[in-house]
Amino acid sequence: MENQNDDEEAARRREMEHDPWEVIPSTTNEELLFLACEHGVPGVVRVLIDENVHIEGGLVPLSRRNFPVVDKKSLAGLPPHLRHQFSPLMVAITKRFDCIVSLLIGGNADVHWCDAKNDYPIHKCAERGTHSSMKALLDAGANLHTNDVNRGTALHRACRAGNEATVNAILEHITSLCQQSDASDTDDDSWRQY
């Protein structure tokens, strides 16, 4: 009887002692990119970008989709980024991982990506992002004039959310545009729309 208990105990120990790689679920590189962006693992993001993973996580931009509207019940089991069509950049912005935002923008992530609710990365950043993320988006060419479904711009969203850091980043960007316009001898008055 004692040998049987010892054998059972040894079997339980063997079961518990497994290779660490067995714990990692098998997944696609695109799904791994989303997970790395969601949990703040820049090393994995860098490796995946170097491996030429699809920078938008395999998602197809709304403007290029040609399939019918999907029933919400069929989306119930999907992760949030798939249900709402968030790009990895949007995930990193909302989680406030500035390093990952910079990596993704450096890897040519689409700063004009549109999610299922017609929000853009600049809108997500205005509400939940940081000064650094907003600056990176604006430096990458994100459009400050893009409206959300309520016809609000990034500045409107930042003010509504009370996000002083992104309000300051937007105002600094507008100020620099004004100073550039004043320093040049051209008649470029594009900054006046602010």
Image (cartoon, helix red, strand yellow):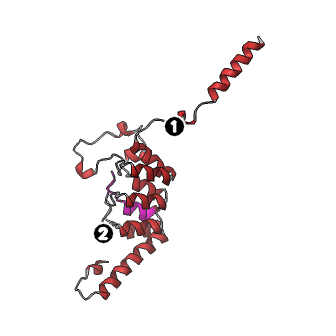
Looking at the picture, how far across and down is residue 10, in whole percent? 69, 21
Residue closest to the eye, 133 or 144: 133
Residue drawn at (38%, 61%) of the image: 106
Q: Which mark is residue 145?
A: 2
Q: CA distance from mark 1 to mark 2?
A: 42 Å
Residue drawn at (40%, 57%) of the image: 104
Q: How many marks?
A: 2
Looking at the picture, how far across and down is residue 188, in whole percent? 24, 82
Question: Which residue appears farthest toward the front when viewing the image?
Answer: 50
The residues colored magenta run: 113-127
- In screen coordinates, is 100 left or right of 69? right
Residue closest to the eye, 16 or 39: 16
Report if residue 10 lies within the magenta region: no
Residue drawn at (41%, 67%) of the image: 136
Quarter of the rendering occupied by the C terminus: bottom left
Q: Is label 1 or label 2 in front?
A: 1
Looking at the picture, how far across and down is residue 90, in whole percent? 40, 56
Looking at the picture, how far across and down is residue 97, in whole percent? 49, 58
Considering only order in the chain, which callout, 2 or 1, is on the residue closer to the N terminus?
Answer: 1
Q: Amino acid at mark 2?
A: His
Q: Secondary structure at mark 2?
A: loop
Quarter of the rendering occupied by the N terminus: top right
Residue at which label 1 appears:
24
